[in-house]
Image (cartoon, rainbow, N blue to C red):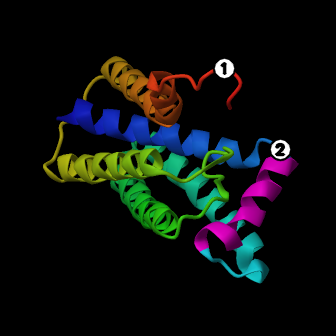
Amino acid sequence: MWYLTVGCQSLLAVVFAASTAGKVRGRQTYADFRRSLPATVRIPAGLAGAVAATVVVAEAATTAALLAGMWLPGLALAGLASAGVLLAVFTVAVGSMIRRRVREPCRCFGGDRPAGPVHLARNAGLLAVAVGGALLLATGPVPAEPAVAAVAAAAGGTAALLLVNLEDLVSLARPLPPAGRA
């Protein structure tokens, strides 16, 4: 059971690290994220800067707690709980964006596509991972050797990279438009 918990933590840590990096990889990406908030999630323009900073700090802190929780069990539940709360909020926000047919790009990973069903499925799946990890942790997993933890973390990280790129993977399966149409 402990391996699954570490896998959940590492998957979520990679996703939150990628999400944070996608927002702060440059001044322009952060500014785009901040400017998108009023249109995408109806944050008043005057609060967009504070909300953007709060999201970035919360994601970074969640990443740190998830990683540290692999070796400091007291932080594991905090990291999973923080991930769960953030993912619940993000899932509701994406659902609202889809329902309102918002065409403004979702800047959740620094991307430039509007929120869609793939974003909703990704967030719901990650929320299930956070809840599942917390439930596994509550059953009292037994700590394992550090080498095994590293393998579990690598497996979780690989799965996270696939989830982060789910939208790109799905787009590869779509047929190409006829020549001359974009």
Q: Is residue 180 shown above or below 108?
A: above
Q: Which element is circle 2 on?
A: loop
Give how far across and how far down residue 177 sits, in percent: 58, 26
Q: Residue at x 70, y 49 (%)?
A: 23
Question: In the image, is 38 to the left or to the right of 118?
Answer: right
Nearer the viewer's eye, disc 1 or disc 2? 1
Q: Quadrant of residue 122?
A: top left
Is residue 144 visible in this depiction of the protein?
Answer: yes
- Between 134 and 88, the residue placed more toward the observer is 88
Q: Residue at x 52, y 46 (%)?
A: 63
- Between 113 and 68, the residue placed more toward the observer is 113
- Between 153 and 72, the residue placed more toward the observer is 153
Q: Say which residue label 2 marks.
A: 26
Figure quadrant of the N terminus:
top left
Give how far across and how far down residue 90 sits, in percent: 48, 61
Q: Residue at x 23, y 48 (%)?
A: 132
Does 151 appear in magenta?
Answer: no
Figure quadrant of the C terminus:
top right
Q: Residue at x 63, y 59 (%)?
A: 103
Give how far across and how far down residue 44 sits, in percent: 70, 82
Q: Residue furthest left?
A: 139
Is residue 71 visible in this depiction of the protein?
Answer: no
The numbered disc on residue 179 is 1
Tag 1: residue type?
Ala
Q: Magenta residues?
A: 27-41
Does 34 appear in magenta?
Answer: yes
Tag 2: residue type?
Gly
